Image (cartoon, helix red, strand yellow):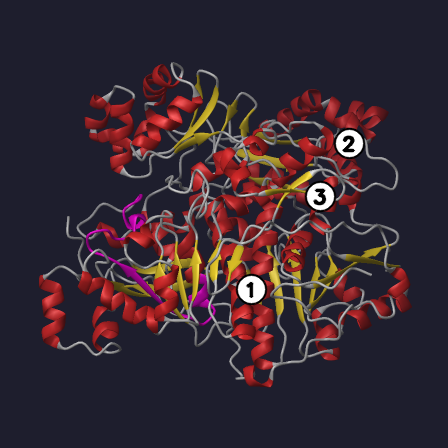
């Protein structure tokens, strides 16, 4: 039996019926927090990840692949014969003794085994079930074949990445599964917290497709409602550029950063050309822009470029991969990587919780080993190491929204932090967003509709700020800071994602917040953490993708590209999960917690396989365009018509046979070397040529429907502005229409899961206008007089219009 676990979730029982990456990563996060996770595998088909190596390394018999060991460390393993009705009954009995069950069966399979929601909920009302599937458990596409690769194409992520002359390219590294696992962990937390309040569990139906819509398209459906489409394919400039000695990662989010960068490379006249403030204009003049950038970057080393950019507050960093991440001075100083008992290196959990002192945590815990198949079968009748944790009657208030009654002061900006606090608002929290008219949330201006109130017209701001109230307070003056402190004194949670030094510069560090509100939890989300050599560096999602290795696996073989934004929602979801842990700690101790979730560390989790394969097998994983180790053939193929592409992935031999039958190619059918994935991978070029000829004569939608009908995962490369309408999203109620005071009626994306005990439409209100709730909060709740409000307006401590507009 495993040793007693410590952590905020100690005593929580989780039954893991999932396989591959998404479900096991969800349950890994729970195990890392102390939950007792028991994994059950079918004796006839154990988790395929046990025999998986992304590098193709040979695994000894009886030795599991290192990625499996990373995802399943600290769990215990039972086996069951799912073909046996009595065995399924035994698993069902174990499930009803758990707090949480996680499964990733094909839709309908859990019901057929007697392990679906209706059966489990009837046996144990307090149990919650998390189901993870490509499209969601119900709807016209629920049984549609898909892989993470084809889901990227379906959601619109693939079509707008890359060079038009070279074709679209998907993000690498099985990113869809890591994203889905992260959202599933938060959905599980929401269901479990709700069950603690009501005594009734929830069914969390997670759609990987919807997870990708939220994390890999940057609210492009909203963008399509603001701007005419279609969204054009392209790359960022500057981004990942060639240096004298390798690749360097850059980004210029703000106009000032772009101007400073042009001055740095000795081309200030480019910054003076207003056309190039617009990234799409830079893309249309890509040869000219690249010539100017590369003339400078190729003359300097990566270290020189990073140093010069850092002096000017331009985000810059070396490009990380499975080898260089282990050498990174900042990650080493923060002890981000630890050694697995099997000998390879892996990242530690991507959060830190600190008690009321806020003292730096000790060394990271040593990872526990992963179990062998059925290792704990001897304890199958009594598998749980601890008795079920009794429900706390004092917490039973009957409110199903897990964060209802929670007061949140939101100091976040851009995407990662706002996405986290918007989720809290959806799940019941009262979130008060604090900006200033001198420095509003910078996302209000990024890609905004250019009109007289442009700060209210940015699609990304809209998508990441639903359900909040908005107050403007100038925090670098005494009056504004004093009012913010009054709000904090009555808060349960404060969330911020400034650079590490900013909060202390405002006089609102952990010591001050803890003094104002001893029970308050402070969630901090700096790009690189609160300590270490890089703590003061500016960083955005693109930098995080570049540093973490996610960009290393994305792009053409000779040209790495950023994933585009996925690190922000990844970081936000991990922050919400860590907040759930801190709330449990507060429940036990009565005092607040300092929670640190640096944006880079959840990204490193999603890129963990690179470090794992390098340290386990000495193989550096490389990008291969649209090809990958999990499916063959896999690619994006041009179809009939302008900018028409189809994504296809053959994940098993049955799908290959179906594809060959559809192609009608006798030579492919007769070739025995192509019967297995290794042979198909070796002949990928020839197979691609045959698929390309078939696709080139067909409409992309018609070709995809024919492939899907034959059981082959495929999707048109949807333009991100054309995701709506979609029959699956309509069935699941993914979009919610809200009336915005400036932009009118808009479709807003919901969360990527449905909870059985809650409505699907969870947004309580549209995103707030700048300072929209000043009077409601400052007068109605803090009791300021008309005269005090007017004095604050005159001093520009508060307002409803940016001071510089």
Instruction: Report if residue 805 is visible in the image.
Output: no
Determine the CA span between mark 3 and mark 2. Answer: 30 Å
The residue tagged 2 is 677
Label 3 crowd bin: few (<14), some (14–19), many (20+), radius 10 Å: many
- Earlier residue among tags 1 and 2: 1
Quarter of the image for residue 691 reads top right
The dot on residue 340 is: 3
Q: Residue at x 18, y 76 (%)?
A: 784
> What range of the chain is rendered magenta?
423-447
In the image, is 153 to the left or to the right of 164? right
**Considering depth in this image, is 322 or 687 the residue closer to the camera?**
322
Label 1 crowd bin: few (<14), some (14–19), many (20+), radius 10 Å: many
Determine the CA span between mark 1 and mark 2. Answer: 42 Å
The x, y position of residue 269, in whole percent, is 20, 22
The x, y position of residue 482, in whole percent, is 23, 66
In the image, is 214 to the left or to the right of 82? left
- Image quadrant holding the N terminus, namely bottom right
In the image, is 547 to the left or to the right of 794? right
In the image, is 670 to the left or to the right of 394? right
Instruction: Report if residue 162 is visible in the image.
Output: yes
Of the residues tagged 1 and 3, which is closer to the observer?
A: 3
**Considering depth in this image, is 219 or 414 the residue closer to the camera?**
414
- Earlier residue among tags 1 and 3: 3
Residue 441, magenta (yes or no): yes
Q: Residue at x 60, y 58 (%)?
A: 184
Query: Badges 3 and 2: C-beta atoms under 8 Å apart?
Result: no
The x, y position of residue 575, in whole percent, is 49, 56
Q: Secondary structure at mark 3?
A: loop
Of the residues tagged 3 and 2, which is closer to the observer?
A: 3
Label 2 crowd bin: few (<14), some (14–19), many (20+), radius 10 Å: many
The residue tagged 1 is 581
């Amino acid at each position: 039996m495993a040793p007693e676990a410590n952590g905020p979730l100690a005593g929580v029982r989780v039954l893991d019926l999932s396989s591959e990456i998404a479900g096991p990563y969800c349950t890994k996060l729970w195990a890392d927090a102390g939950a007792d996770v028991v994994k059950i595998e079918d004796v006839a088909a154990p988790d395929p990840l046990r025999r998986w190596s992304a590098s193709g390394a040979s695994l000894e018999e009886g030795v599991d692949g290192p990625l499996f060991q990373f995802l399943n460390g600290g769990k215990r393993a039972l086996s069951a014969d799912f073909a046996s009705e009595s065995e399924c009954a035994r698993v069902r009995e174990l499930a009803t003794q758990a707090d949480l069950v996680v499964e990733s069966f094909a839709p309908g399979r859990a019901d057929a085994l007697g392990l679906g929601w209706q059966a489990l909920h009837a046996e144990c009302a307090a149990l919650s079930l998390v189901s993870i599937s490509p499209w969601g458990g119900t709807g016209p596409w629920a049984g549609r074949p898909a892989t993470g690769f084809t889901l990227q194409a379906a959601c619109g992520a693939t079509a707008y990445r890359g060079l038009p002359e070279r074709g679209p390219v998907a993000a690498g590294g099985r990113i869809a599964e890591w994203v889905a696992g992260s959202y599933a962990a938060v959905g599980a937390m929401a269901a479990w917290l709700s069950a603690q309040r009501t005594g009734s569990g929830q069914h969390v139906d997670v759609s990987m497709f919807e997870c990708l819509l939220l994390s890999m398209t940057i609210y492009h459906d909203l963008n399509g409602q603001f701007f005419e489409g279609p969204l054009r394919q392209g790359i960022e400039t500057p981004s990942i550029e060639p240096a004298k000695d390798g690749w360097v990662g850059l980004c210029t989010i703000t106009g000032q950063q772009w101007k400073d960068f042009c001055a740095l490379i000795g081309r200030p006249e480019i910054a003076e050309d207003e056309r190039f403030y617009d990234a799409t204009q830079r893309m249309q003049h890509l040869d000219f822009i690249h010539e100017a950038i590369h003339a400078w970057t190729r003359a300097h080393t990566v270290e020189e470029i990073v140093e010069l950019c850092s002096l000017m507050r331009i985000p810059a960093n070396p490009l990380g991969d499975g080898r260089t991440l282990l050498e990174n001075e900042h990650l080493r100083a923060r002890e981000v990587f630890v050694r697995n008992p099997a000998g390879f290196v892996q990242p530690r959990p991507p959060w830190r919780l600190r008690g009321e002192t806020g003292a730096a945590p000790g060394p990271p815990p040593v990872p526990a080993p992963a179990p062998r198949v059925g290792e704990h079968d001897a304890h199958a009748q009594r598998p749980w190491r601890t008795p079920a944790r009794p429900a706390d009657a004092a917490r039973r208030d009957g409110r199903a929204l897990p964060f209802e009654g929670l007061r949140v002061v939101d100091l976040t900006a851009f995407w990662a932090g706002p996405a986290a606090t918007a989720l809290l608002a959806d799940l019941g929290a009262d979130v008060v967003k604090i900006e200033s008219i001198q420095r509003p949330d910078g996302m209000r201006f990024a890609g905004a509709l250019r009109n007289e109130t442009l700060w209210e017209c940015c699609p990304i701001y809209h998508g990441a700020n639903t359900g909040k109230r908005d107050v403007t307070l100038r925090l670098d003056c005494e009056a504004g800071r004093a009012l913010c402190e009054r709000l904090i004194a009555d808060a349960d949670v404060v969330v911020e994602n400034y650079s590490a030094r900013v909060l202390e510069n405002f006089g609102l560090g952990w010591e001050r917040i803890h003094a104002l509100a001893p029970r308050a939890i402070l969630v901090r989300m700096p790009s690189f953490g609160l300590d270490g050599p890089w703590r003061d560096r500016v960083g955005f999602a693109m930098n995080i993708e570049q540093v973490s290795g996610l960009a290393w696996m994305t792009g053409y073989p000779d040209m790495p590209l950023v994933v585009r934004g996925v690190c922000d929602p990844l970081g936000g979801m991990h922050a919400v999960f860590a907040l759930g842990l801190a709330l449990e700690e507060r429940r036990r101790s009565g005092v607040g917690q300092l929670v640190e979730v640096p944006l880079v560390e959840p990204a490193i989790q999603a890129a963990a396989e690179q470090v794992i394969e390098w340290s386990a097998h000495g193989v550096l994983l490389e990008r291969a365009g649209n090809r990958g180790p999990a499916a063959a053939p896999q690619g994006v193929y041009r179809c009939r018509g302008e900018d028409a592409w189809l994504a296809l992935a053959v994940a098993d031999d049955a799908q290959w046979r179906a594809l060959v039958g559809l192609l009608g190619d006798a030579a492919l059918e007769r070739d025995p070397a192509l019967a297995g994935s290794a042979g198909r991978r070796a002949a990928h070029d020839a197979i691609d040529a045959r698929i390309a000829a078939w696709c080139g004569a067909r409409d992309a939608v018609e070709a995809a429907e024919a492939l899907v009908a034959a059981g082959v995962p495929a999707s048109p490369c949807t333009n991100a502005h054309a995701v709506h309408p979609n029959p699956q999203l309509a069935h699941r109620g993914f979009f919610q229409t809200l009336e915005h005071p400036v932009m009118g009626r808009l479709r807003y994306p919901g969360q990527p899961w449905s909870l059985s005990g809650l409505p699907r439409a969870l947004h309580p209100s549209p995103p707030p206008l700048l300072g929209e709730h000043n009077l409601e909060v400052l007068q109605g709740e803090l009791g300021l007089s008309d005269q005090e409000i007017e004095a604050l307006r005159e001093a520009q401590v508060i307002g409803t219009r940016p001071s510089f507009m």
